[in-house]
Image (cartoon, rainbow, N blue to C red):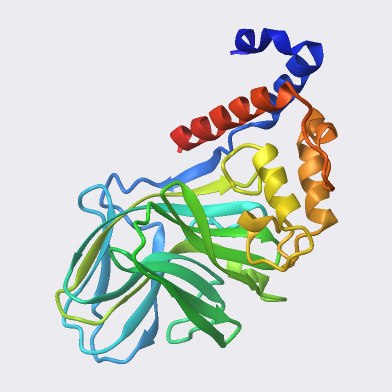
Amino acid sequence: MLKAFSSVGSLGVALIGALLAASASAGPVGVIDEFDDANLTEYTLTKILDQGTTSNIAFSSPSGMLEVASTGADGAEQVLFLRNDGFGLAEGEELRVDIDLTIAGAVNDLGIAVGATPTAGVREDYLFVSMRSATQVNSRGFIGVSEIGQIQNFGVDVEQLFISRPAASTFELGYYAGGARTVMRSEDVGANISIGDNVGFYADLREDGATIAGLDNLRIVVQLPGDVNDDGSIDLIDFGIIRDNLFDEVVGRALGDLTGDGLVDFVDYREWKDNAGELASQVSLFGGSVPEPLSFALAAIAGAAVVGASRRR
C-alpha cells in the first residue's frame, strides 16, 4: 500500500505509518457466550417484577442463539438474567450482542443489561437496552430505586445492541445499525457504580406463548482511548467530530464527548491527541489542516482502516 504513495516523501511515509499504528483494532476482551450449547447455568434468573400468579418467563438456547418464551402469562413479569461467573463491565469497556430476531406473539422486551446483584421483587440499580419488536429499540432502568424515563427509537434495522462505560459512573446505551453507532441515552449513575458489576439480559413478556429469539455472541469489547466513533481506529474522522462539536453539550462518545461529562472540550481533544501519535501534529482545532499532498493519502488510509475495522466485526 505504501508504494502507491511513494511520491509523498519521507514526512508522508512517517505520517502514514503513524496513522496505521494508531489504527489498532478494538479487540474483544472475550466472547462471553456463543450459545452453541443448551447450557445456561452460568446465568441466574431473578424476577424483579411479578404482577401475576405464575412464573412464566424462561430462557433457552436450543439452536445456537438465545431465546426467551412465556407460558401461562397472566400479568407483567420482568426478569434479569445475569452472569454468575464474575463478568462485569469495567470503565472503557462495551457490552455487545448481535441481533437477528424471530418473534411470535405480543412481546415487550428482550435485550442486554448491566446491574448490581439483583434481589427478587426489587427493581433497583440496573440499565437495559432491548428490542421491543423487530425494528423498535427500547431503553430504561433504575438508578438506585429511581426509575429513569423510557426512550424508544422506531423503524431501525438493528445489527447489535450495546452498553458502554466510558467513565466510572457513566453508562451509554444504544445500538449499531448500518454500521453507525447510535447512543440512545447516557446516564450518570453517581455513587451507584455497582450497576456495572454484572452483565447479561433483561426480558419482559406478558402474553401466553410469546417468544422472541435471535440474540447471539454476547461479548465485551475494549474502547480505544481517543476513538470517538468507536470504529477501532484513532484517525482524522475522530478529530473532525471533536473539532466540529467543540464546546457543545452533547450526549455520547460518538459526538466527541470522550469523558462522558456531557461537554466536548479540550479534555476530550487531549485524549484524542495523546493517542493519535504523529497525526496530531498535522492538524489544529482552530482552522489548521493536513498539508497537501498528504491529505489525500491520509484520507485513503483512514478509509481503509474504517473498512478493515468494520470487516473484523
Residue 216, image x and y in percent?
A: 34, 50
* Image vertical order of residue 310 relative to residue 107, above or below: above
Number of marks present in the image shown: 0
Residue 225 visible to the viewer = no
**Quadrant of the snapshot with the C terminus:** top left
* Image vertical order of residue 173 relative to residue 254, above or below: below
Residue 183, image x and y in percent?
A: 54, 62
**Quadrant of the snapshot with the N terminus:** top right
Q: Name the residue nearer the viewer: 229 or 27.
A: 229
Q: Name the residue: 49% across, 62% down.
A: 174
Residue 24 visible to the viewer = yes
Give the quarter of the image for residue 208: bottom left
Q: Name the residue nearer the viewer: 171 or 208.
A: 171
Give the quarter of the image for residue 193: bottom right
Q: Name the residue: 70% across, 31% down.
A: 22
Report whether 72 appears left or right of 239.
left
Q: Name the residue nearer the viewer: 32 or 207.
A: 207
* Image vertical order of residue 228 relative to residue 68, above or below: above
Residue 171, image x and y in percent?
A: 61, 65
Q: Name the residue nearer the viewer: 228 or 48.
A: 228
Report whether 14 appears left or right of 296.
right
Q: Name the residue: 23% across, 79% down.
A: 56
Q: Name the residue: 26% across, 89% down.
A: 75
Residue 284, image x and y in percent?
A: 83, 42
